[in-house]
Amino acid sequence: MPVTAYSKEARRELDLEQWLAQNRYQSNDDPELMGVPSKLRAKATYDIECSCCGAQGATLVRGARSKGTGKAIAQGHFRFRTADGANPHNPLCDFFDEQRVRGSEYLTNFASDKSALTKAIRDLVCRGITGGLFSQTDMRAMRQWFLHEKTAHAIPLDVTAELLQWCVDMYAARSVVGADSLPFIPEHGLLPQFNWDAAAKLEWARRNEQLFVVVERWVYFQRKSIERPLRLIAQHAGQVVLDPSSLRGKYEATWKLSVFAASYLFEAGMRSPAIVRQHPSIWGAAGHALLALSALLLFVCDWDLQRASGLYCRLKTMPPLPEGLDGNLIGLNPFHDYPAWQVINSARHIAAKRMDERPVSIQIAEVKSEIQEQYQEWARRR
């Protein structure tokens, strides 16, 4: 469900309560929305648009409260339908399935997040909007640009959970280090404590080097790193999704600008969040706000990294503003799941290159038997 949507009249994103207040209707006096005039409901159908794909036909959906406690359990929101009840969203729109709540996975709420990092970025957003460096219209345009990219570079999601686990096992085979990392030769078998299992894994990895070279930069197949990809596969099974390789250059520019911005985000002597000292590939949800701002700066600079870094410097050196509402916007981080889609895309490349789909453990067991036979044959001829 879209918690916020774009008002053409206000030229900004508003939630349902804000939009009603903008139109001089206080929802606090009518939480059930029973008294909303028909003219105002009609206005919503053409004034309110989906912030992602521009769909129209908004209807007003009241919030919900617990019967037992009276506490709010669901926020009022907009729902989009055509006159005949059909779904007007683009199939690749993040809000196509309005029953699925799109929260912090996709959107960065600069108003409600109280972390030091997001507060600092909210201040920059306020400065940028007030100073005319960018606007909420620009952020909406970035969302629509991202949707266009998804549409133009869509591919079927044909990666399975089983394939991701196969890739984890593949990567584990090459994790052998230390004394057992030398290529196998029969003489190694003379050692009483020779690690045949490690030697077999390493030999299997060497024979399948073509699988490792297609893995994208910063992609690691480990149990933790496939958790989010597994959820995406379950969520988008049978659908078309964005080919992340089409945005590789823009993603790298975004994290480079984010690293630069993070280094100067806090004043000398201030305690800064841990992500300032980490690589963006491991930021996770903590880095959404910074990546969202960096993507916006790049977007308004036509993805020119040098210009965007200069814009950040102008933004950072503008005088701080009193606490205001300009930063109270929800912004799309177009690269919110990019690392996870990279993992999925690399698994797709591996599937295209592998010659044997059997479990890695079975293949390694065969290699172990083979190298043991090599040793035994060598020993018989000594």
Image (tube, rainbow, N blue to C red):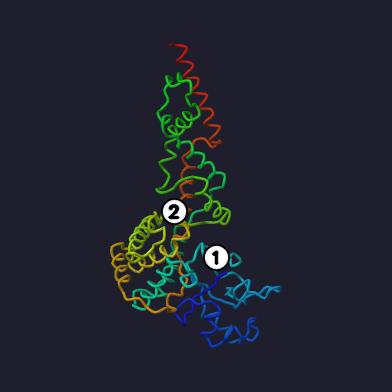
Q: State the image quarter where residue 179 is shown.
A: top left
Query: Residue at left 39%, top 57%?
Result: 251
Image mark for residue 282: 2
Farthest front residue? 269
Question: What element does badge 1 sit on?
Answer: loop
Q: CA distance from mark 1 to mark 2?
A: 22 Å
Q: State the image quarter where residue 320 is shown.
A: bottom left
Check disc 1 and give the amino acid type: Arg
Q: Name the spot of residue 112 as percent of width and height, x first.
A: 50, 71
Query: Residue at left 60%, top 83%?
Result: 28
Query: Residue at left 63%, top 81%?
Result: 31
Residue at image mark 1: 102
Q: Name the spot of residue 372 as percent of width and height, x first.
A: 50, 21
Residue neighbourhood size for the residue with mark 2, other residues' Cα within 10 Å, grouped as few (<14), some (14–19), many (≥20): few
The relative height of residue 67 versus residue 292 in the rendered view (above or below) is below
Q: Nearer the viewer, residue 66 or 100?
A: 66
Locate residue 35 relative to residue 215 in the image: left or right. Answer: right
Query: Residue at left 38%, top 63%?
Result: 271
The relative height of residue 78 versus residue 256 in the rendered view (above or below) is below
Q: Name the spot of residue 205 as percent of width and height, x first.
A: 45, 34
Check disc 2 and give the amino acid type: Ile
Mark 1 or 2 closer to N-term? 1
Question: What element does badge 2 sit on?
Answer: helix
